[in-house]
Image (spheres, grey):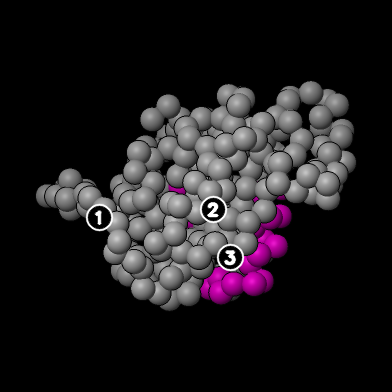
Amino acid sequence: MDINASYIYSFYQTKLGGIVKRIIRQKIVSYLSEVDSNIIFGYGYTSPYLSFINKHNESSQVKELRPDFLDGAVQEKYDFEEKIIHEYFIPLEPSTVDLVISSHLLEFVEKPISSIEEIWRILKPNGYFIAILPRRSGLWSRYDNNPFGYGRSYSSKQFQNLIEDFFVLDKKKSFLHFPPWEHYLNYKTYKTIENIGDNIFPYMGGLMICICKKIVYAKNSKKIKKIPIKNIVTT
């Protein structure tokens, strides 16, 4: 992989990254009241968002599961548990989680369908999956000064094809209409640009948030090659 947790952490400490972090937090929190959120797990690099959720939702159990390829020296410590896991194997029993939030994951793994299958497995019946993804035609995926400029990006159709056997796409919204420029004019005008984009160009943002509901019985129309457990669990 060409990215790690240290790089993503460093981005969110910049002024541009701080703006992105606040906007993504707002987008996620705006949907929490609509779904069951007693047990919330982050999958990928989600700690900047989970820290806010954990602080303002004291009744929720929050935990981050970070794939081993994102491991790196991160200075900040959080008030919730963080665990390094294999990228295709979540060490949880089936149907135990209310909500999974994913960020900085599906654009980097070689087999995103395996990650989707694991998310489906650990979610309770009718549980929800919130994915933060770079849009393929968005501006943010074309600049390498931010983590969303690395790995693969997704169109709406590509993401729907990815989840169609496991989830129903309940809602989708594009955001980050302002450019990924580290310039004082961008910092001054990003709120105005974001408001204009939301009202006039709602499908032209750099990122998209997808709210997906678990299908209780996943289809078996596609044969997915499972990773042998002996390659995941050391003996």
Residue at figure coordinates x 67%, y 53% from the top left: 173
Relative placement, left or right, of 186 versus 128 is: right
Q: Which residue position is annotated with label 3?
A: 170
Q: Secondary structure at mark 3?
A: strand
Residue mark closest to the camera, 3 vs 2: 3
* x and y percentages locating residue 163 in the rendered image: 44, 56
Per the rendered image, the range of residues in magenta is 22-46
- Residue 107, relative to residue 93: is it above or below? above
- Which kind of residue does numbered mark 2 sit on? Ala
Mark number, residue 112: none
Quickly name the residue at label 1: 223
Q: At x 46% / y 68%, what residue is drawn?
A: 214
Characterize the local packing of mark 3: few (<14), some (14-19) or many (20 or more) Cα atoms within 10 angstroms: few
Q: Residues within 10 Å of mark 2 (few under 14, many from 20)?
A: many
| Quarter occupied by residue 118 | bottom left
Image quadrant holding the N terminus, namely top left
